[in-house]
Amino acid sequence: MISYPRTAGKLAALLKSGYDAVLDQIRQKQVLVNVKEFLRARTRELANTSALQRPNDQLLDWFNARKASGLADAAIVYHPKGACMLHGFTIEAVPYTRKLDRALYASERARFDSVRPAWLKSVALSHRQELLDAGLSAAVVDRMEKDGKVPPGYEVHHRLPLDDGGTNAFSNLILMRNDIEHIAVHGRYNPGEKLIHATAYGDMVTAVMPLPPQGALIYPDPSRQWVSERVPNIQLYEIYK
């Protein structure tokens, strides 16, 4: 018989049997869970920053083990529709200080509205072929160059967030397809995101974060094998052991 615990209460009761035991049931398809609700229930158990540090450490261990085995860089990340592998990304431990000056943060976000079109125009002019190779049409790149418009379905992403030490410098920006990749990078149930949200403004924490490929101006880029891939959710659940 297959169990489908959906409510917060049923998921909490399931987790009381022990996380390893639950993962075994999921592997054996005795239990089916919704990825968002399951990780929400699990992170409620890890309610403080010291407990949330463990999945951060385990995600970094996962990345280092992957590199040690000779596999190419990739990050495993949360997406509401299921776990994703972002090929070409790295996983790095970032000393993250949530900006205490929220007025400064707000002003930086507001300034981004003028920086974004200027960056898009610059990239379209100087890296046209790279954008075409990544799959953008000539008409879209032309519009970027002329009007600084974000291509449909994309967002301009800060490599290092403004809420930490990130800036609006052109070197800190990358064009990223919104769904799946941009949503996945900002996934609330990525270990680093959970740790950051549990940290007070002005405090510092070492968060393990997925970072785009160095030098990339756009993601995904199939011409460089920088693409996203859906992977079994159990791979993400195991990070939270």
Image (spheres, grey):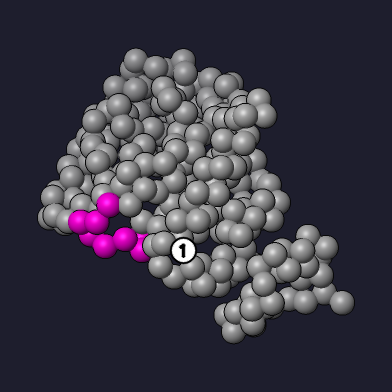
Q: Main secondary structure of the magenta part?
A: loop
Please name whichever residue, 188 or 119, is drawn nearer the observer in this view of the structure: 188
In this rendering, would 58 be left or right of 146? right
Quarter of the image where the N terminus is located = bottom right
Which residue is the site of mark 1?
A: 51
Q: Residue 237's x, y, as percent? A: 63, 58
Does the magenta run of residues contain 201?
yes
Tell me the element at label 1: helix
Q: Nearer the viewer, residue 21 or 5?
A: 21
Residue shown at 13%/50% (left/top)? 104
x%, y% of residue 187? 48, 54
Quarter holding residue 17: bottom right
Instruction: Determine the image quadrant of residue 171.
Output: top left
Highlighted magenta segment, given as a residue range = 197-204
x%, y% of residue 236? 62, 53
Image quadrant holding the C terminus, namely bottom right
Determine whether, in the image, residue 108 is placed left or right of residue 11.
left
> Residue sitting at 51 percent across and 72 percent down?
45
